[in-house]
Image (cartoon, rainbow, N blue to C red):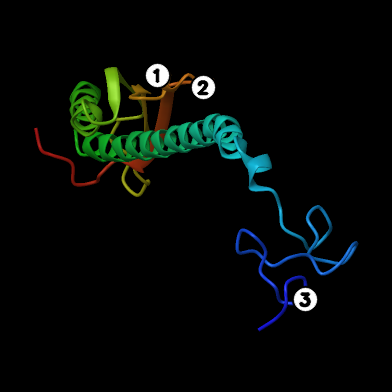
Amino acid sequence: MAVNGARGDLGEHGARAPEGPGEPGEQGEPGGRRDLRSDRGVTTIEVVILAPVMFLFILVLVAFGQLVDGRGGVDGAARDAVRAASLQRTVGEAQRAAQRAAESQLEGDVCTGPVDVDLSGDFAPPEPGEASSIITVEVTCEVKGLGMLGLDIDPRMTGSSSAPLDPYRRAA
């Protein structure tokens, strides 16, 4: 066993004694022990700084998720509305069918408030040998959840879709 003060001796607290002045292992020197009391409160400071940043990051992720979900819903409703309108024989019937199709897709789930449907195109029957005319439907609504996030994102979204009039439209 080593004599007190010799290399390998354990000090009073069970820690190895420094090997000599200025050698690695001496407290305060590079490679030596750190005083753990100097790290007190660092974790609290890290949490105080990082928590708002993480909260804002999550808020932005939620906003983009709502934005993508709303965009997909409005575009899908426009596609369904133009298909429903293309099967009708008159402008009035087409407008009502497009409105019903868009509302069934959007109300309650994606949008808040009214769903606006704008129908444009020519419903006159084509001359023999001519192609069917194209109709366009624009669906606009206020996407749910975008206004409450506090970000500067316009909650109103518009989706547009076009389709040819169905040559085998419903008979009157």
Residue depicted at x 18% and y 46%: 168
| Sequence-first disc among 3 and 2 | 3
Q: Which mark is residue 151?
A: 2
Residue 34, image x, y percentages: 71, 53
Say if residue 52 shows up in the picture.
yes
Give 50 or 9, whichever is nearer the viewer. Answer: 9
The C terminus, quarter of image: top left
Residue 132, placed above or below residue 91: below
Give the Cα separation between the discs numbered 3 and 2. Answer: 68 Å
The N terminus, quarter of image: bottom right
Give 130 or 40, whichever is nearer the viewer. Answer: 40
Quadrant position of residue 45:
top right
The secondary structure type at the circle numbered 2 is loop
Label 1: which residue?
A: 148
Between disc 3 and disc 2, the foreground one is 3
Label 3: which residue?
A: 6
Give the Cα separation between the discs numbered 1 and 3. Answer: 71 Å
| Sequence-first disc among 1 and 3 | 3
Q: In the image, is 56 to the left or to the right of 82?
A: right
Q: In the image, is 17 to the left or to the right of 36?
A: right
Question: The residue under label 1 is which amino acid type?
Answer: Met
Using a 10 Å C-alpha cutoff, classify the residue at mark 1 as few (fewer than 14 neighbours), some (14 to 19) or many (20 or more). few
The secondary structure type at the circle numbered 1 is helix
Q: In the image, is 166 to the left or to the right of 133?
A: left
Question: The residue under label 3 is which amino acid type?
Answer: Ala
Residue sitting farthest toward the left = 172
Marks 3/2 in contact by CB < 8 Å: the verdict is no
Marks 1/3 in contact by CB < 8 Å: the verdict is no
